Amino acid sequence: MPSESPAARKPTARIPRCAQGERGYDVAQVDEFLAAVHAALASAPHEPGDPARGLNSTQVRATVFAGARGGYRPEAVDALLDAAEDALAAAERERCLRARGPEAWQEHLDDLTRLLRNRLDRPRTQRFRRPSRPRAPGYSAAHVDVLCERLGSRLEGAAPLEPAELRRAVFPPAQGERSYEEQQVDAFLDRAVQLLLASR
């Protein structure tokens, strides 16, 4: 029998916690969220047409927890969330294949690829908007462009790129013409993670 994935297990006290003087993720919030993940995985539809219940992979990626002294260690929780997103994405793929067939799934992949390509094919420093306010901080355009080019190589099959590298991407701050609007870049990276997971 295959072993259960970390994301599919019910939350337990084995998640490491910070020392009392250190800030981690709020324990109650994390436990509640991981319980919802477990429920979503346990209720994954097995027949075509069955509705999906509970969380989906996109919601897992977007979740944010409050900080709390003595809370769960962020790196441990983040690893569980990565596993949860992977597992839910696989269930979503299986659900689509069962309900609509491989052609519909391929169409979904093609739509995501076109969406990303429309952005990646733009010139360097012009792939995303500038922050709306002149002095508002944004992400360094040069650093975002480097990651975009790595993603482009991955889509062409020329270089590896794992979803975790996009999830953990951190860009130096910048302003004005040297910056990109953070929200637009984040939304793009969410789509990119979705595509990489769906392409597995």
Image (cartoon, helix red, strand yellow):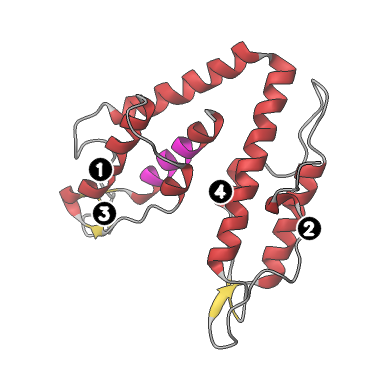
- Residue under the image location 54 percent in, 30 percent down: 200
Left or right of residue 107: residue 132: left
Circle 1: residue type: Val
Q: Secondary structure at mark 3?
A: loop
Q: Nearer the viewer, mark 2 or mark 3?
A: 2
Q: Residues within 10 Å of mark 3 (few under 14, many from 20)?
A: few
Question: Quarter of the image holding residue 42?
Answer: top right
Q: Residues within 10 Å of mark 1 (few under 14, many from 20)?
A: few
**Is residue 43 on the magenta stretch?**
no
From the viewer's side, name the closer residue of 162 and 84.
162
Return the residue at label 2.
10
Q: Secondary structure at mark 1?
A: helix
Query: Quarter holding the N terminus?
Result: top right
Percent x, y of residue 159:
34, 33
Dominant SS of magenta comes to helix
Discs 1, 2 touching: Cβ within 8 Å? no
Q: Mark 2 to mark 4: distance in Å?
A: 19 Å
Instruction: Magenta stretch: give its range.
Output: 184-193
Discs 1, 4 touching: Cβ within 8 Å? no
Q: Which mark is residue 136?
A: none
Q: Mark 1 to mark 2: distance in Å?
A: 39 Å
Q: Nearer the viewer, mark 3 or mark 4?
A: 4
Sequence-wise first label, 2 or 4: 2
- 171 relative to 30, above or below: above
Return the residue at label 1.
146
Sequence-wise first label, 1 or 3: 3
Return the residue at label 4.
61
Residue lying farthest to the left in this orientation: 177
Percent x, y of residue 129:
28, 41
Return the residue at label 3.
133
Circle 4: residue type: Arg
